[in-house]
Image (spheres, rainbow, N blue to C red):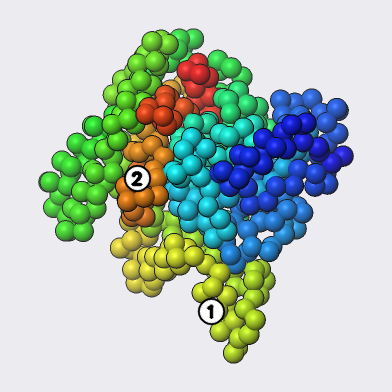
Amino acid sequence: MPYTLPQGFESYFREWENRIGAFIEFDPAKDTPVSSIKDAVSGVSGLPFAVKDNISVQGFGVSCGSKLLANVRAPYTATAVSKLLASGAIPVGKTNLDEFGMGSSTDNSGIKKTNNPWDVSRVPGGSSGGSAAAVAAGLAPFALGSDTGGSVRQPAAFCGVAGLKPTYGAVSRFGLVAYASSLEVIGILSDTISRCRDVFSIIKGADPLDETSHNAPKGAPGLDARNGIKGGGKGVIGVLSPEAVAKAISAAGDSTGGSAGEAESLKIAAQAAELEPEVRKGFEAAKKNLSDLGYTLKDVELPSLKYGVPAYYTIATAEASANLARFDSIRYGKRPDWAENPDDLIDKAREAGFGAEVKLRILLGTFVLRSGFQDRYYLRAQKIRAGIRLNFEALLGDSDYNGPAGACDAILLPVFPTRAFDRGPSSLSPFAQKAADLYTCCANLAGLPALSFPASVEGGLPVGVQLIGRAFAEGTLLNIAEDYE
Ligand code: GLN
């Protein structure tokens, strides 16, 4: 049955959508096979939701924010979306993103601009900026996004909503257009934590169409409220203090016996780790509130974090260069009107279809993978990735869900060093935006679940903080954030 918008909502929607431009396509009345709303009993039954435009919903477009794919219609539906349809939720449209998920502002979209509903001169964050802005403006109670290096959590923080990046493999990636397959996962942006829990409980689980998907192992904490914290108490939260991170990185930079390049990279990381004063205030407020709620806070360190961004961009661009090779305008995408021969056809299509950031990343990816150089870049990045995973295991424990003695139940850290930035001269450069992925990309490199939730509002803009937990312990993170809410 086609969905009709509640009375009065249409004009509210139009007014806000004109200001923020969250959607690439909005068509709530599309004849999507939603399970009969009356029969479905679930937390999402009858609720509208928005879907990032790199996730397929049959009948809707799937542009990935790229001019090259602007006219492509999805021939099938992503498993995460199918599960929501079966639970009675209604997909109302597709949201804007940085092209193929590459960016932190949604300004890298080849289709349109999206503004932050809190202040329309500012970006909504990215890459799932359209999904975050739609939820923040009340245009949908929840939305799906994808998180490869922070793309659900950072826009959630910029727009003052909840953003869950599940454990790698906890949600099927079938129907998500791949950017960096070993890092990414479909995630949730929602107005409340309990809604996030409802949606996650529906979309999670192994899927025969995605060989990397898993069910939670035996012993993993369930999703029920109050599960997953050991000893019946409130639990232990490790605090990754940004000052300590910046200090440790600078110290490493001073004493490095490595190359000038390494010292330079550490200098950049130390700068990026420092928080804007308002974000620091929000982080301190979160610490105080969590301690007042009865959690035990203790300072922790994550020594490999300093190399996280270079490792992330090496692996992500390497995978992107392979994943994006399929977009040649022969099988998918917009063909040029005329070409000399097939090679010329592909060249012309990609030249006109891909934006500058995508081209840069394809080049970077082929650079780090070129023959004879894998040891220097790609394999080193994989070693750093293993180091980050081991650092987290030392803090959180591994498959033993009680953790080692003294283990933390979750790690608290910032999401991003700034609040939503503007597009003026004080904006972050594309390079600074990448360096600022420091706090988000580490959860993707380790495959761990991470939740961004609003901590406070500072100077009229929301500040989010982040919790990272053990694999498949999303329930623990949701419980802590719900306590906070
Ligand atoms: N800022 C990261 C990047 O540009 C985030 C990507 C993502 O999570 N899709 O790669």
Q: Position of residue 94 (x, y in %)?
A: 66, 48
How many marks the image carries: the answer is 2
Q: Is 189 placed above or below 197 here?
A: below
Question: Looking at the image, is mark 1 or mark 2 earlier in the sequence?
Answer: 1
Whole-percent x and y of residue 41?
Answer: 79, 25
Q: Nearer the viewer, residue 180 or 348?
A: 348
Q: Position of residue 183 (x, y in %)?
A: 49, 48
Question: For mark 2, what is the residue?
Answer: 436
Q: Residues within 10 Å of mark 2 (few under 14, many from 20)?
A: many
Q: Amino acid at mark 1?
A: Asp
Q: Identify the residue at image location x=48%, y=35%.
A: 118
Residue, disc 1: 347
**Rendered residue at 53%/52% (across/down):** 113
Q: Which mark is residue 426?
A: none
Q: Secondary structure at mark 2?
A: loop
Q: Is residue 318 above or below residue 40?
A: below
